[in-house]
Amino acid sequence: MSWDWFTSDDYWSSRLVFQKLLAIWYLVAFVCALNQFRALLGEHGLLPIPDFLARVGFRRSPSLFHAHYSDRFFAAVAMTGAVVSAVLLGGVADLVPVWACLLLWAVPWVLYLSIVNVGQTWYSFGWESLLLETGFLAIFLGPAHTGVPTLVLWLLLWLLFRLEFGAGLIKMRGDRCWRDLTCLYYHHETQPMPGPLSWYFHHLPPWMHRVEAAANHGAQLVVPFALFAPQPAASAAAGVVIVTQGWLMISGNFSWLNALTITLAVPAVDGAMLGVPPPDDLAAPPLWYGAIVIAVTAVVAVLSYWPVRNLLGRGQIMNYSFNQLHLVNTYGAFGSVTRDRYEVIIEGAEDDVAGPTTEWKEYEFKGKPGDPHRRPPQVAPYHLRLDWQLWFLSLSSRYGGRWLPALVTKLLEGDPQIRGLLRHDPFAGRAPTHLRARLFHYRFTTPAERAETGAWWVREPVGTVVRTCRLDTDGTPVPV
């Protein structure tokens, strides 16, 4: 039986690059989980996984943790995922039979699915589902000693199309500033977590912001169709995606969203452009492997009904999974852009009685703006989950849910796990007697202000998020 219809050997090197990059982002994701889970999701975390498992069954959130949960087991799952990701990065999957390669790539997908499905608020963003959907399709790409399955390449391009086109549509249907090309007057300053260059991007002249917005529309609403065109058009389209996503990477911190989007563009690149020719002795895929790839393609085709309906419908939603396995999702970002930046600043005090003369000391977080003189850091592709949620809290107190009272309690207790999420604990591990959270309005300094003061931000208090409180005798925070 001839497999010429099934494989695309011209994309052999593109597959290798794609797999290496994906292994890196898997590794980053598992390291993020390992470093932050105890404070956020552990047995004594802000949103404990055991409490979630008691409320939600396996069918609603498939996860290994339904069989057993302990903080030690979670750490073992995350560590295993990190190790397997490193093994994949090292190319071990290319040295084993096809069946073993598929199983090896399935391991991080199963492990990360288990984490995301119990991650609650902390894992509710589009890049989690994007990593899972990408990782699922990557299972079926096969090892380096076989031909590249054409159908899987098309499925990856279909994913990239939905990601880019969905993001473009939600902008045009959403905030008016995308249609009049003025959204980037505000975005670089008000995005969830600015980066080291965001101040400079914000101060670009208005005409450049309008060019940015127009180029974004072209990259997301026009270019994705060329991904399915013959070469070299498909490679050119991939190049546009890579350049625009790289621009987004240096202008802000969006976890591994932009890096993974760049990775998804690689399968569209003609392998000859990468300068690494395929081996002459590529093995024909086993018959059972071809059958699996065809079956997966059929499943994706059926599941595509829901995201396509969402794209074409007037009530388009962003970043939604239509099934518990996070397959064939809908994506999108920044359907609306905030015009003003607010930050929640948490402060503690050690006075026995809080009053007008109390000295309040500010907790400093690793990524979110706090000290006006601190330059916004580069965080992505790493993801600081608590910092990110605090940006949403600044938009509305309803985003605090159950985790904000828990955070207040643990800060008043001097919880060491929570302190591990901080850049600076003003009490050096001691528990404060009082705590409060105030809302500040932030804006970037002008070039003249920056030259004079050295500050990156100007801020002023505008309200209260958490009133001054202390721990009661039963260990719960009470206002004073």
Image (cartoon, rainbow, N blue to C red):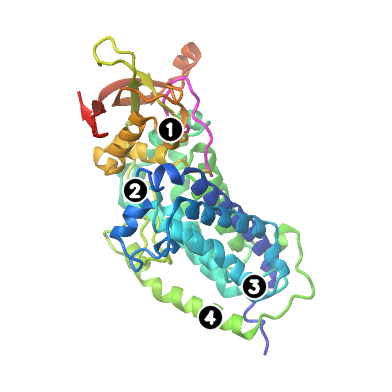
Q: Considering the numbered disc 1 on the image, is that residue within a helix, a strand or a loop?
A: loop
Establish if 162 lies above or below 45: below
Cα gap from disc 1 to disc 2, whole angstroms: 22 Å
Which quarter of the figure has residue 276? bottom right
Q: Earlier in the sequence, mark 1 or mark 4?
A: 4
Question: Which residue is nearer to you in this view: 216 or 308?
Answer: 308
The residue that label 2 is drawn on is 335
Q: Amino acid at mark 3?
A: Ala
At a point 52% along the width and 43% down the height, the residue shown is 382
Which quarter of the figure has residue 102? bottom right
Q: Earlier in the sequence, mark 3 or mark 1?
A: 3
Cα gap from disc 1 to disc 4, whole angstroms: 45 Å
Proximity of marks 4 and 3: CB atoms separated by less than 8 Å: no
The residue that label 3 is drawn on is 100
The residue that label 1 is drawn on is 368
Q: Position of residue 31 (x, y in %)?
A: 55, 47
The residue that label 4 is drawn on is 294
Q: Nearer the viewer, mark 1 or mark 4?
A: 1
Q: Amino acid at mark 2?
A: Gly
